[in-house]
Image (spheres, rainbow, N blue to C red):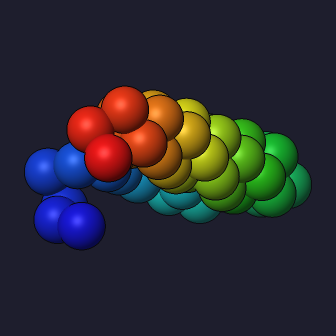
Amino acid sequence: MSLQDLKIPDSRQLTPNPDNPFKICGNVITYSRNIAIDAFNWYAWEKKRKQQLA
């Protein structure tokens, strides 16, 4: 697996905001969730594609 296969979202949304320091917690959760969903979808797609070739 290479970095080109999985697209890592931009992490600039994780920059702390001095006006609302607790917002970063929600951003971290959203960021992590998006990475996990993308990884799952990529794995499911690759598994199905490779299964068809086998």
Which quadrant of the structure image shows residue 18? bottom right
Dividing the picture into quadrants, the one containing residue 9 is top left
How many labels were placed on the picture? 0
* Depth order, front residue of 9/13: 9
Apparent side of residue 43 relative to residue 11 in the rendered image (left or right): right
Please determine whether, in this image, residue 37 is positioned above or below residue 52: below
**In the depicted view, which residue is nearer to us: 46 or 11?**
46
Q: Which percent across, then down, holds residue 3?
A: 19, 61
User: In the image, residue 23 lies at what x, y percent?
Assistant: 79, 46
Is 12 placed above or below 45 here? below
Q: Quadrant of residue 53?
A: top left
Using the rendered image of the protein, determine whether residue 14 is visible from the camera's viewpoint.
yes
Report the side of 46 relative to 20 (left or right): left
Q: Is residue 15 above or below residue 30?
A: below
Q: Is residue 25 left or right of residue 16?
A: right
Most extreme residue toward the front is 54
Q: Which residue is drawn at 77% across and 52% down?
A: 29
Look at 42% across and 42% down and name the residue there: 51
Q: In which quarter of the image is the N terminus?
A: bottom left
- Whether residue 9 is visible to the viewer of this picture, yes or no, is no
x and y percentages locating residue 10 in the rendered image:
35, 44
Q: Nearer the viewer, residue 39 or 48?
A: 48
